[in-house]
Image (cartoon, grey):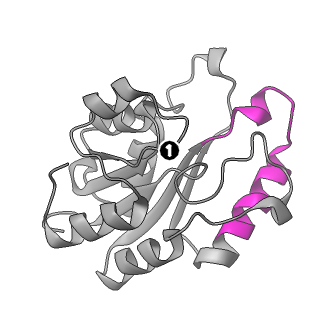
Amino acid sequence: MNAVTAVLFDRDGTLVEDVPYNGVPERVRPLAGAREAVALVRAAGLRTAVVTNQSGIGRGLVTADQVRRVNDRVDQLFGAFDVWAVCPHAPDAGCTCRKPRPGLLLEAADRFGVAPESCVLIGDIGADVEAARAAGAHGVLVPNRVTRREEVEAAEHAFPDLLSAVRALRDGKWSR
């Protein structure tokens, strides 16, 4: 993973099953291969972060404490991530952190003390890839049932699953 120093993961639909507005830690289920993928990143000596939009907070559907407890459960299942960057705003709030804006990625890179260009963001929708691009980071798409075809076609790097994406990054194979 050449000049890459950190891998940033989207949470829902990338690391764990997407349960809309989940505020219940017991409902957290890792996706197939996700724990192994994170372990490979760590074994390569790279830092790890989760960058996640959690608009349920801004919409009043879950509390910040509920989201924190769900994130704690993710840490229990995967091992602690070095950085968590969470956008709590509703989509219409106009914040700079909500993906596809670059704020969460810039925050994670800053907390690592690295340039965004040395970060890779792996996510399941176009907003993840767009946020990476806007921050100057590398974006990798791992599509699932909610990913639109045009998002896959627009992605510079797309892989069928998270484990394949991490293996390709590790091995320097950045093609589709």
The residue that label 1 is drawn on is 144
Q: Quadrant of the N terminus?
A: bottom left
Left or right: 35, with 118 as reference point: right
Where on the picture, by quarter, is residue 44? bottom left
Image point (13%, 66%), residue name: 172
112 and 63: which is toward the camera = 63
Image point (30%, 54%), residue name: 120
Number of disc labels: 1
What is the x, y in percent for residue 7? 36, 61
| Label 1: which secondary element | loop
Left or right: 176, with 165 as reference point: left
Left or right: 152, with 35 as reference point: left
- Neighbours of disc 1 within 10 Å: few (<14), some (14-19), many (20+): some
Residue type at mark 1: give it: Asn
Whether 115 is drawn above or below 135: the answer is below
Whether 123 is drawn above or below 96: the answer is below
Q: Extreme bottom residue here? A: 43
Image point (45%, 73%), residue name: 38
Whether 29 is drawn above or below 66: the answer is below
108 and 14: which is toward the camera = 14
Specify start and end residues of the magenta stretch as a single range: 53-74
> Is 57 part of what is drawn in magenta?
yes
What is the x, y in percent for residue 58? 76, 29
